[in-house]
Image (tube, rainbow, N blue to C red):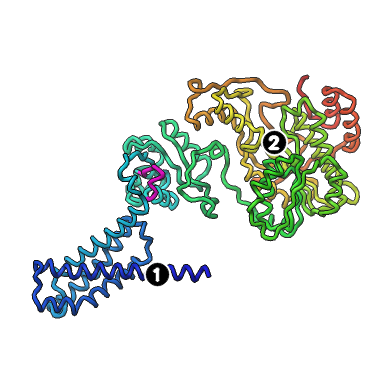
């Protein structure tokens, strides 16, 4: 029915356009004769006009059709469209003129009529198209109001930039006028895109901005590297230009966003990295038709895990989180209204530290693939509550691993952290103990589950991370608090981190620790300064940065490898495999018992000292 409706609409539109053009051409042809003979057409020429109009107008209509004038969108009329209209009418005039010379004017309109008819048709049809464009792009109130649009430079003269230019020209409500392009391709410089000049290379931004009185730059190459994006944004900011960017290329291709849906450039754009090329078929083979369990599903990592897993068509996804509000938000913001395509999705508010409850859940749902993202992750909070860190990160993980093994789950993927490497915090040490628990469970007699851990650094924008804190401090007028001018951290986008977690899961055979290639570390002081600049403020003038000193458990920099671990390559360049020698000394089961006793009877310092017995590289902070 929908196709029938579209076909009917198309036929009615074409018929209406045909009749309109027919009337215009008949009128132009008649008027051309009148103008040729000063509105006193001789009888024999009046007869010629009647006898020739049908095939002359028919020829013109056929050429209009051949040049695509019946297929164009009426509200889009620019120089290329005008040239096609001009060409179709010019070809018609040339044919008629050549016929006049061949037949010596017999049965062919006079040459002056041919020329006048050509001009009248072009003016009337072109005027109609211009009127339709004006009608669609501006209302009468826009024409009567003061023109307050801002001049915009578009960086990138490719398809995305050209589409953006057209949209900005047609949608005056956006309040932006494209005045010039900049592009690194020197072959494009000096040419025009929709009538807008490609003025110079991107590095000449300051000169071009001054020449065209531009106040804003729109970065329109969504496939460019983050390094290039960062350099352009910094160049624009240094000369006082506002910086916007187009949506991500994936959103444009999928249709989730339009090119004209601009947004201010964010810190995530400048700290993120180039898109990850995942081995999607291997991930699909691992997840398609499988029953999947995600713990901590309401957190930033868990939510993204759920979203990406659903794209690979599992049989079911079981979402577990201790926080009721987190599960509610997951339902409302991720699951509600999403086409699940026959996938069974369940949510449970459940404490993973309750081994009996988790065993009952496993018995009922029989998950085949488990992603364990639930954790206490805030270093400062856990430093004075080692018992909570151990309960949720170590004890609960060890218990969950045992339940998964007893239920014959195929894979168990534990979301670890780079803070587990040579830890100085209780949180990092508890995660390291959880890694050791998984390796021991892997070697347990009768185990058929493949256990693996995946380490990565800070996730951009996750709860408790530095970026939301800086945003709040900027909104409050400052100051921005940085622990130390030399402190550095690794950053990843949540989409990249989760995609590589899924990639790692396909690589493991059991007992491995995977580390994601996190690129170069970033100074936190640089992050603070970039956020101040992106907010349009000036450091030490509008807002200050103060240094508070390292907090208990914090490091100046995070490490990527423990000395006892060997680095092995994988089939993906951004996934590294570490294989540690078999742990010597006391087993994890002994650590489990003794640490439980310590948190019942001992002080914070005693619990930390006990942890050192099982994680010798742990260097606890002073009380």
Q: Position of residue 444 (x, y in %)?
A: 89, 46
The image's mark for residue 560 is 2
Q: Which residues are magenta?
A: 170-178
Residue positioned 88% across, 35% down in the render: 592
Q: In terms of secondary structure, where does tag 1 sit?
A: helix
Q: Is residue 222 left or right of residue 286?
A: left
Q: Is residue 413 visible?
A: no
Image label count: 2
Name the mark nearer the viewer: 1 or 2: 1
Q: Is residue 589 visible?
A: yes
Residue positioned 35% across, 46% down in the render: 198
Q: Position of residue 171 (x, y in %)?
A: 39, 49
Residue positioned 17% across, 72% down in the render: 97
User: Residue 8 sits in which quadrant?
Assistant: bottom left
Position of 363 relative to 215 (above/below): below
Tag 1 residue = 12
Q: In the current view of this chain or complex, which residue is farthest to the front? A: 141
């Amino acid at each position: 029915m929908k196709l029938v409706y579209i076909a009917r609409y198309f036929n009615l539109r074409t018929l209406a356009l045909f009749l309109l053009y027919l009337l215009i051409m008949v009128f132009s042809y008649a008027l051309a004769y009148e103008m040729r003979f000063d509105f006193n057409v001789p009888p024999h020429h009046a007869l010629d006009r009647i006898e020739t109009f049908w095939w002359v107008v028919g020829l013109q209509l056929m050429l209009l059709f051949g040049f695509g004038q019946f297929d164009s969108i009426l509200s889009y009329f620019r120089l290329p469209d005008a040239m096609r209209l001009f060409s179709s009418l010019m070809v018609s005039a040339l044919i008629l003129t050549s016929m006049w010379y061949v037949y010596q004017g017999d049965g062919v309109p006079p040459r002056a009529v041919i020329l006048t008819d050509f001009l009248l048709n072009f003016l009337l049809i072109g005027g109609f198209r211009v009127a339709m464009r004006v009608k669609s792009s501006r209302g009468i109130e826009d024409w009567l109001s003061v023109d307050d649009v801002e001049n915009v430079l578009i960086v990138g003269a490719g398809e995305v930039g050209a589409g953006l230019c057209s949209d900005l020209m047609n949608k005056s409500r956006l309040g932006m006028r494209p005045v010039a392009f900049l592009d690194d391709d020197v072959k494009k410089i000096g040419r025009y895109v929709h009538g807008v000049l490609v003025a110079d290379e991107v590095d000449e931004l300051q000169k071009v901005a001054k020449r065209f009185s531009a106040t804003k730059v729109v970065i329109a190459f969504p496939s460019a590297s983050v390094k290039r994006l960062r350099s352009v944004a910094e160049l624009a900011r240094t000369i006082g230009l506002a910086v916007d960017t187009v949506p991500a290329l994936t959103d444009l291709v999928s249709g989730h966003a339009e090119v004209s849906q601009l947004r201010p450039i964010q810190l995530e754009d400048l700290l993120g990295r180039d898109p990850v090329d995942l081995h999607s078929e291997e991930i699909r083979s691992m997840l398609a038709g499988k029953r999947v369990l995600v713990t901590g599903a309401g957190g930033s990592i868990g939510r993204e895990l759920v979203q990406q897993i659903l794209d690979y068509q599992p049989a079911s996804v079981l979402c577990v989180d201790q926080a009721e509000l987190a599960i509610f938000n997951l339902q409302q913001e991720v699951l509600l209204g999403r086409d699940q395509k026959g996938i069974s999705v369940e949510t449970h508010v459940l404490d993973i530290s309750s081994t009996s409850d988790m065993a009952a859940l496993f018995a009922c749902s029989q998950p085949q693939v488990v992603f364990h993202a639930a954790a206490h992750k805030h270093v400062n909070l856990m430093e004075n509550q080692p018992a909570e860190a151990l309960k949720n990160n170590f004890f609960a993980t060890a218990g969950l691993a045992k339940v998964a093994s007893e239920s014959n789950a195929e894979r168990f993927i534990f979301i670890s952290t780079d803070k587990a490497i040579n830890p100085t915090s209780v949180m990092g040490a508890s995660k390291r103990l959880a890694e050791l628990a998984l390796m021991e469970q892997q070697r347990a007699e009768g185990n058929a589950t493949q256990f693996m851990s995946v380490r990565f650094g800070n996730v951009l924008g996750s709860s408790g991370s530095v970026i939301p804190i800086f945003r709040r401090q900027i909104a409050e007028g400052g100051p921005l608090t940085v622990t130390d001018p030399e402190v550095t951290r690794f950053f990843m986008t949540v989409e990249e981190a989760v995609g590589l977690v899924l990639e790692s899961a396909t690589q493991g055979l059991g007992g491995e620790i995977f580390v994601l290639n996190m690129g170069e570390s970033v100074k936190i002081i640089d992050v603070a300064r970039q956020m101040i600049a992106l907010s349009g403020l000036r450091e030490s003038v509008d807002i200050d940065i103060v240094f508070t000193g390292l907090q208990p458990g914090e490091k100046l920099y995070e490490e990527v490898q423990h000395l006892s671990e060997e680095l092995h390559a994988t089939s993906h360049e951004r996934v590294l495999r570490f294989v540690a020698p078999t742990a010597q000394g006391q087993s994890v089961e002994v650590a489990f018992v003794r640490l439980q006793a310590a948190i019942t009877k001992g002080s914070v310092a005693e619990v930390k000292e006990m942890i050192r017995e099982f994680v010798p590289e742990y260097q606890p902070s002073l009380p």
